Image (tube, rainbow, N blue to C red):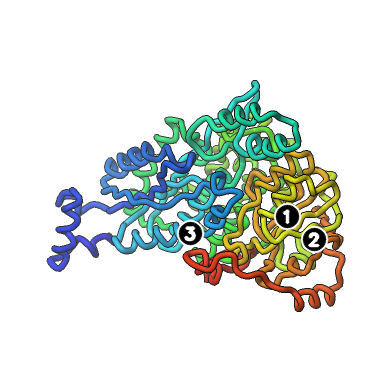
Amino acid sequence: MRSDQIKKGAVRAPNRCLLYSTGISPRDLDKPFIGIASSFTDLVPGHVSMRDLERYIERGIAAAGGVPFIFGAPAVCDGIAMGHSGMHYSLASREIIADLVETVANAHMLDGLVLLTNCDKITPGMLMAAARLNIPSIVVTAGAMLSGMYDNKKRSMVRDTFEAVGQFQAGKISEKQLKELEMAACPGAGSCQGMYTANTMACLTETMGMSLTGCATALAVSAKKKRIAYESGIRVVEMVKENIKPRDILTLDAFKNAITADMALGGSTNTVLHLPAIANEAGIKLSLDLFDEISKTTPQICCLEPAGDHYMEDLDNAGGIPAVLSALEPKLFSSKTVNGTNIKIIAEEGKILDENVIRAKNPYKPEGGIAILKGNIAPNGSVVKQAAVSEKMKVFSGPAKIFNSEEDAMKAILDKKITSGYVIVIRYEGPAGGPGMREMLSPTSALTGMGLSDSVALLTDGRFSGGTRGPCIGHISPEAASGGAIAAISDGDIIEIDIPKRTLNVKLSDDEIKLRLANAVKPEPKVKTGYLSRYAKLVQSADTGAVLK
C-alpha cells in the first residue's frame, strides 16, 4: 500500500509514534489509510449537513477494513459572496482546494480518498485533485436543498430572492413581501434547488462515473444520501484493493458523456470552465468547439430552474441521472465508473418515472442548453445558456453601454438608467482582470426582476451563475485585461448577437479595433497583494478553463 511509506519498517518508528498519538491501534497499520476530504462549514447551506455524512463515510470505510482520517477543505458560498468583493475569491478557491487535497494526500501518503463536497467550486476543485493525484477516489456530493414554499408556490433562492431585488426596485413587490421571501426560499441544508452550478456539477460527476449511482440527486436531508455516503466509504476501500484510479474513469469518453448530459439537462455555463480544468489535470484537452458540437446534436430533455419550474427533488423523483442517461444511451460512450460497472449498463437500467420532468420523447429544445459564440468580440469563444434565453432574444442587436466593473453596472441598473434595447458590457472582470472572474447574478437577476430580460442583453469577460436567465453572454475570450477586443468597445457601438448562428460581433472594422486597443488605457490591477494578486499573474484565459500555469 502507498501508506506503507509512513508506517512500515524500523526506520518509520517515529512516524508510527505520531500515528499512535492520534489514537489508532497497531492493528490499523495493516489496513488502507483513507482520507475524507470534507468541506464542512457552518457558513455554507450546502455544507452544513456534512457532519452527519462524515460519520456515515467513516462507518463505511471501517466496515470495509480501512482506517478513516478526516481533513478539511474550504468552501465558498457563491450566493453569499455574490455582488461584492468576496466573489473575487470564488473561482480562485477552486485551485486552493485542488492544491490542499493534493498536499494532505501526498504529505501523509494516503491510499485512497472520499471527497465530500457540494457547492460550485468545491466539487470541480476536488475532482481536479483526484485527477492530479490519481489514487483511488470517490466523490460524495452532499445533496440539494428542498424547495421553499411561499404564497402557495414552490420557491428557490435564485429566482425568488435575487430576482425579487429587481421586483422590489421596480415597485412590483413590497418590502414585507421581500422579507417573507427571504425567510421562505431556503428551508434548510443543501445546495441551491435548481440546475445551477453545484447541482449541475453533481450530475456530471455521477455521469463521469466518479460518484455512486443516485448520488447527484439524492437530497441533503434524505436517508438515501446517508446510505450513499456509507456505501461510498465501503467502495473506496474496495477500489484501493482493486487499484481503480481516477484516470481509469476520467477518460475523454467520460468527459464527452458529461458534456452530453450537461446539454440534455440545460446545465450551468460554469461547466465550460470546470470540465476543461478537470480534464487538464487528467492530461486531456477539451475545446470549446467540442461543447458546441455536442450541443448541436443533443436535445434538451430537462428544464429545471432557472429556465423552467422543476427542482432537483423533481429530477430525483423522476429517476435521477440513470433515467436521464437512459434517454441518452445511444449517444453515450462506454466508460468505467466507481461502481465497478459501465455507464452504458447504468443507462440501460435507468427508468424515466415522470415524463413531464425528463422529456425523452418530446424534448424542450432540439439543441442542448449551452451555446458557444465566436466573432470579433470573442475570437476565442464565449458562452451563453441558450436554454434560458427566450426565442425573441436569440437574435438581437443594440447599442453598447460600457462598464468597467460589476458595481458600476449594478448601480446603473438599480438607478433605472438602463432601458430597453441596450447591450450592457461589463469588462475587466475576467480571470485575470477581475481577478477571479466574478459571477454576475446580481445584475442579471435585477434585470429579470425589473422586466428587462427580454429587451436588454449583457456581455462580460466575467461569468454567470447557473441561475442566470436571459441573453447573458460570458467568458468572452480573450478578456479585456489581456488586450481582448471587448476592451475596444465604446458606448453606442452596435453589438450583434445571433445565437442560432453562434456569432457575437461589434460593428467595427478589424483596423478600428486594433487602433482602439493600441490607444486604450488599461486600468490599474484591482488587487495588488495576497493570493488574488498571485492568482491574477498565473491564471489563463476562460477558454482554457481558467487554469493556472
Quadrant housing the N terminus: bottom left
Q: Quick check: 313 above or below 104? A: above
Q: Position of residue 243 (x, y in %)?
A: 36, 57
Q: Position of residue 175 (x, y in %)?
A: 66, 30
- The residue indicated by pointer 2 is 504
Structural crowding at the residue carrying mark 1, measured as other residues with C-alpha within 10 Å and reported as few (<14), some (14–19) or many (≥20): many
Query: Quick check: can you spot residue 293?
Result: no
The answer to the question of whether label 1 and label 3 lie on touching residues, with beta carbons closer than 8 A, is no
The answer to the question of whether label 3 and label 2 lie on touching residues, with beta carbons closer than 8 A, is no
How far apart are the two marked residues, 2 and 1, measured between alpha carbons?
9 Å
Q: Amino acid at mark 3?
A: Met
Q: Amino acid at mark 2?
A: Leu
Task: Describe the element under mark 3 as helix, strand or loop.
Answer: helix
Q: Residue at 85% across / 44% down in the picture?
A: 392
Q: Amino acid at mark 1?
A: Ile
Q: Residue at 76% across / 49% down in the picture?
A: 471
The image's mark for residue 128 is: 3
Q: Nearer the viewer, residue 319 or 48?
A: 48
Q: Is residue 403 left or right of residue 495?
A: left
Residue 474 figure quarter: bottom right
Q: Position of residue 437 (x, y in %)?
A: 61, 59
The image's mark for residue 473 is: 1
Residue 429 figure quarter: bottom right
